[in-house]
Image (spheres, helix red, strand yellow):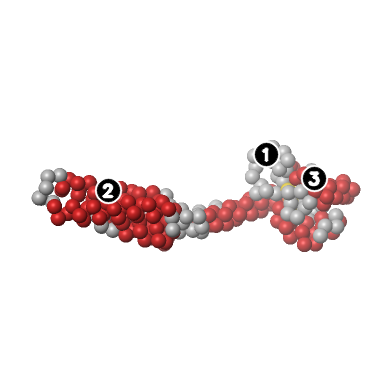
Amino acid sequence: MNAPAPYDPRVPSDSMPPGRAALSVTWAALPFLTLGYATPFTFAAAALWRRSTHLLVSSAAYIGIFTLMLFLLPGIGEEDGTQSAVGVLLFLLAVVGCGHAFLIRRRVFDPHGLSGIDNEAVVERVRRQRLLRDKARALAASDPGLARELRIGRPDLPHQYNDGGLIDVNHAPAEALSLLPGITAELAARIERVRAETGGFVSAEELSAVAELPPELTAGVATYAVFIR
């Protein structure tokens, strides 16, 4: 069974959710789509929204360029070089402004990376780790010898098999046992001692009862523990 496909953004090479990504692309494209006439207003709106020094300086610069262009427009055809100057100013507003907007659109629309895609990636990673643990447990139950060869549940030993972060309670040393949720160094040492006396455990419930662990730790231990005999 294959793991669910990761989040697939509608905007190529984008990590923002579709709605926010589309809005950011529209905002960034406005300078080019309006031939530069919307550039100062695009950056000014972003500056007022985000209160960013970079955006404030940028909007002031584009407003200055826009004002100079409007001042020169009436002189086109009357003075040599005026048309070229207006063309350069329009290029700055339309092309440079558009490129600038695309470069900073993530900072404008998702300045702290809180768009939600990171959460989706974390959820997907947790689900995958859970699936890996389930598969490793099933393998350990059907073929304990192979599980020991693969070093399932032994983070203290070099291994290539990805077991999703399992800890083999019946074989791992105290240092590895302390990786289990809520298991302190003292509790890990107790588990190791009781294990030597009893020969091992078959479940998290038996472990908690025999080693006298706090009952509230049982569920967390069961999530990451494997009991290979």
Q: Are marks 3 and 1 in contact (CB under 8 Å)?
A: no
For badge 1, the amino acid type reads His
Q: Is residue 170 left or right of residue 73?
A: right
The mark nearer the N terminus, 1 or 2, is 2
Q: CA distance from mark 2 to mark 3?
A: 65 Å
For badge 2, the amino acid type reads Leu
In the image, 153 versus 216, the foreground residue is: 216
Disc 1 crowd, CA 10 A, few/some/many (<14, 14-19, 20+): some
Residue shown at 89%/48% (left/top)? 197
Q: Position of residue 17 (x, y in %)?
A: 45, 59
Q: Tell me the tag on residue 174.
A: 3
Q: CA distance from mark 1 to mark 2?
A: 57 Å
Q: Are marks 1 and 2 in contact (CB under 8 Å)?
A: no
| Residue situated furthest right in the rendering | 197
Which is closer to the viewer, label 1 or label 2? 2
Q: Tell me the tag on residue 92.
A: 2
Instruction: Find residue 215 and report its image quarter.
Output: bottom right
The mark nearer the N terminus, 3 or 1, is 1
Disc 2 crowd, CA 10 A, few/some/many (<14, 14-19, 20+): many
- Residue 48 visible (yes or no): yes
| Residue situated furthest left in the rendering | 78
Q: Position of residue 217 (x, y in %)?
A: 77, 59
Which is closer to the viewer, label 3 or label 1? 3
| Residue bearing the label numbered 1 | 159
Q: Position of residue 88 (x, y in %)?
A: 22, 46
